[in-house]
Structures are given as C-alpha cells and as structure tokens.
Image (cartoon, coloured by chain):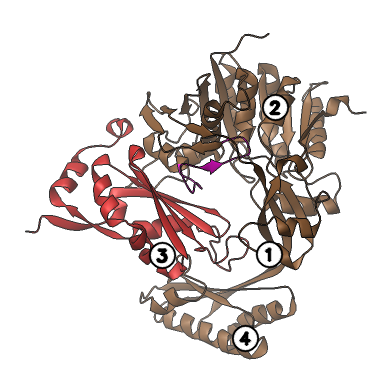
Amino acid sequence: MTPRPAKVFIGAGAGFAADRTDAAIPIVRDLAAQEGPRFLIYETLGERTLALSQIERRHHPDRGYNPLLDRFLEPVLADCLRSGIRIVGNFGAANPRAAAARIAALARRLGFATVRIAVVEGDDLTTLLSPEQFAARETGWTLLREKPAIIAANAYLGAAPIAEALAGGAQVVVTGRVADPSLALGPLIHSFGWALDDWQRLAAGTLAGHLLECGSQVTGGYFADPGFKDVPGMDTLGYPIAEIESSGEFVITKPEGTGGLVDRRTVTEQLLYEIHDPAAYLTPDVVLDITDVELAEAGRNRIRVKGARGKERPETLKATVCIDSGLLAEAEISYAGPNAAARARLAIDTVRLRMARRAPGLALRADAIGLVSILGDTAGTSLRQASAEPEDVRIRFAAESMQREPLELLNGEVEALYCAGPAGGGGVRTRITPRLASASCLIERDRVRPTVSFVDQTP
Amino acid sequence: MSDTVEVPLHRLAHARAGDKGNRLNVSLICRHPAVYETLASQMTAEAVAAIYASRRPSHVVRYDLPKLHAFNFVLDDALDGGVNASLGLDGHGKSLSFLLLAATVRVKRALLERVNNQPQSMEETKP
C-alpha cells in the first residue's frame, strides 16, 4: 500500500467556460516546486454550457467539448506531465471522449507519445429517461410538463468516478457534468484514501472544492470595489491553490508573484457564493454544513479553513434538463445631451404602442441604460419611478418568442426610430439569438451509472 | 448631536450575489465584527424584501453566520424567471448585491468611529 501523503495540493485553472486561459501557468509553476500529490482542476460547465455543447456536437460529432480546451491546456500540459501534476476537468462537456482524443493529440504534438487519459461518462441521461419520466421528476418549475424536445439532460456525478480514474493511473481525467466541488474531492479521496461515507472529511474536501471551483472569485477577482475593497494586480490575478491536510483542514492561497488577494473577506464572499441554507449544501457526495466554518489568517495571502461538517449524502442526484425555448430579440438605440431621458422615454412609449398593435401579446421589456437598466424589473416599475437626468441614455428592448416574426417586427420598429424619431436617436444594434431553458430534476441514484474508461486502451 | 448616524450599508459591509434558477442569494458580510449586531437588528428578512420590492420575491429568508460575521439572504422568484427566462440584461442577478449595499443603516456614532479606526484584517495593515 502506498503511504498516505501529509498534504495534497490542488490548483484551479478555470472557474467557468470562458475564463482566462493563461491563469494556470503560475499555478503549475508553483505546484511543480512542491512535493506530494498535486492536481490542477478546471471547472468550465455552467448550467447552459452543456446544452450549447450538445447542440454543437449534433452539428459536428467530433466536437461538443469546451471550445477553449486547447487554449487552456496548451500552455501547461507539458509541464504538468513532466512534473506529475494531474489534471481533472469537466471540459469534456457533451463529448468527453472527443476532448480526450484532442488532449492526446495535443500531448503528442508536445512530444509525449503516451499519456494516460481517463474519461468519466454516465452523466448523460437523454436516452435513459423518457420526457414523461423527466417531467415526473422535475422540482419546482413545471417546464417539462409540456413534454418539450430535450436538448440535454445530465446528472451531476460525484467524486467517486474521478477517484477511480486517478486510482487507474490517469494523468488527465476528462468529465462531462459532475458537481463542481467533486473535481477537487475526487483527487482528495484518491490521495488520502478517504472512505465514501466519511462525511466529515468529504464535507471538508467539498468545502475546499467549493472555494476553488470559481477560480479567481476567491483570490480577489470579482471582489474589487475601489476605495472599499482594493485589490492589487487585477490584470495578473493569481488563481487559487488549496493545500489540504488529511484531517480535511486546508489553506487557500495563490501563486507567488501574482496579483489578487486572499484574505478573510475574499474567502468569505466565495464561501457563501450560491449557497442557500448554509447548514445544508447538497452535493452528490455529502451534505455540507458551513455554519461552524472558521477562517484564520496564516500568513500573507494565506487563509486557513476549518470547521466544515458533513451529513450523509442525498438519496437522489440532481440533473439539469435543457430544452429549446425559442428566440430572444434585443434592440438598442441611444439618446444623448439635453433632454435625453425624455426622448428615450418617448421612444420607449412609441415602440410599445406600435408593438401592442402589430404583435399583441408579445411581452416586451424596455431598459434605459444610464437611467435604470440592470437593477430594474421587467414590469418597468423602476423605470417609471426613476427621476435622474443622465446626459447619455441607451434604450434596450428585449422580447422572446417561439416564432421569429414578431421578434423581427420589434427589431424593425427600433430601427425605424432612425427616421421616425424622437430626435437624435443613434447607434441602433439589433440581434436575434436562440434561447434555452433549463429545469432541475431529482433522479434516483440507481438509474445513473457513472463509468470510467481510458482512451489509450481503446482501439 | 444625535448619537446615531445614518450611513450607506456599503461602508459597513460587502456582498456577493449568486443565482440558482429563479432564486437569488445575496451574502452580506460585515467589514468589522463589531457591526454584526447592528446589521442583524436592521437587515431583517422583511427589510431586505422591501429593498428588493421591484424584483417581487415571493419569499425571503435570512440565514445567520455569526462566526463569519455574515448573513445569507435567499430570495425566491426574484430573477424574472432566472438567467434562461429573464428578458433583463443581467439575468443572473449578479449585480443585485449592490442593490442591497445601497440601503442605509443607523449606527451608533461611537461604533462607527471604532470601526473606522480598526482595520478588519491583517492584510489591510500591510502596505
């Protein structure tokens, strides 16, 4: 039996599908200088990302993985393979097998003839359940009752298949949908030999994963607020590294010589990010309770985290089901200078009146950027109440429909403001883009069978 | 001179918003542990529901995290359907943390002076 390590190092090279592609370089440089098991994780799958990948795969059967895969891995793959840093990423999206083949090709190009790449599959439920079965398992909303065509349906797998892939010697593990924190928990289960019902340690590892999964959101990115929360080096943000001990306690830090900041405030913001009940954060692996978590400064840009508590994992697995939801139209026009707000309001009223006649029943949203846009509401209450007199207002209309025609009418009405007025309208931009809707389902565990395979063993 | 002053919440706390479907969560984190009780008494679930009235949340819950000097607010149905259904520019509601920070709170003058003169974290004392 291999001796258990004292410490495991996990760096996070990406926190979302379109993250900075050079972020992992300083992490790999620092990890290469450390002793012990070291991992680099990539979290690149938002709720809708997988459905978009699935659509791409239908058009191009050899694609459907994260489109930035090459750019993420090219700068670091050789150093990782040389230094024994193992890579775990959900960048496989809708086609982990194709992503693995792509990585193998990249490795060959970099001079590595054989690389052991594991593929974790089994998250794709599209053919496993009927639309009726999905509808019966939907939580909250009732999007699926109408039995729409399903674009993608994926269960959130847990850490166990990732640990299994690593035990099989994988240098790179490619997954599709897995719970984000499981990307870090898998390597910890493998390295420390944690039992799959050791709820305390699984909770601690899940907490480490939760803090890592959004990349720089824990190291000062998405935190900076000049004069209130200053962050040095926003253009060279260091992405996080966790140093985890076998007890489950860990330190969050970032690479030497990078920008950003790790302190109690940055870690607390990420700790509560997308958490609902802090005593019950559900993952496929464990139920995490963070109410007793304590953060302590342990040096410059180093925060020690302890106190995660765990309860038995949920009975069911969450799945995200994506369906086609028609088209979104957006049309914009600007007004500037004296009386800009009044002219913008007149333009909004004009388009609303004309659209009510030409496409009755089409719900229309109008924002006035510079007056009220982001913090407003679709009903327009905030805009009616706003009294500011900005010098520069950009109106944005939005509507959605399953049909293209009413949306083209809207965009045409906004473009027509060029001549029909009010005065001084300029800079019209219009677009129509496809829209996806997603529903959450709870799936019985025995219906989901995660599999691990190695691409270098397939003919 | 009154012994309490009204200050923007932004001066006393920081916040981050996150989304899951049509549900918004906003963390509220005290810049200094000493203001936790003040915020606990004023930033009630009802007060936060009023701040987000234009988003028409169907239900607001506050979870308290005294060890972290923080609160977590969960607002149901506050995102115009969520990122996939909202017609708004920020369907995730990521910017909505700053709607909370725009609120004002009443603070004892002595407490405010104490908080202003004490850095919260070690990092802030360093150049």
Q: Are marks 2 and 3 in contact (CB under 8 Å)?
A: no
Q: Measure the alpha-carbon separation of dots 2 and 3.
A: 46 Å
Q: Is residue A121 above or below residue A167?
A: below
Q: Position of residue A259 (x, y in %)?
A: 46, 34
**Residue receiving disc 4:** A355
Q: Secondary structure at mark 2?
A: helix
- Please, what is the dominant secondary structure of the magenta stretch? loop
Quadrant of the rendered image containing residue A156: top right
**Residue receiving disc 3:** B52
- Residue type at the position of mark 3: Tyr
| Residue drawn at point x = 49 percent, y = 41 percent | A217
Relative to B117, is A291 on the left or the right? right
| Residue drawn at point x = 28 percent, y = 49 percent | B12
| Numbered mark located on residue A77 in the image | 2
Q: Measure the alpha-carbon separation of dots 4 and 3.
A: 29 Å
Closest to the observer: A246 or A72? A246
Mark 1 — on which chain does it sit? Answer: A
Mark 4 — on which chain does it sit? Answer: A
Mark 2 or 4: the one toward you: 4
Quick one: quadrant of the C terminus of chain B?
top left
Q: Is residue B97 above or below residue A213?
A: below
Q: What segment carries the magenta color?
A: A272-286
- Closer to the chain start, of discs 1 and 4, is 1
Q: Which chain is brown?
A: A
- Residue type at the position of mark 1: Leu
**Residue receiving disc 1:** A143
Q: Is residue A264 above or below residue A247?
A: below
Mark 2 or 3: the one toward you: 3
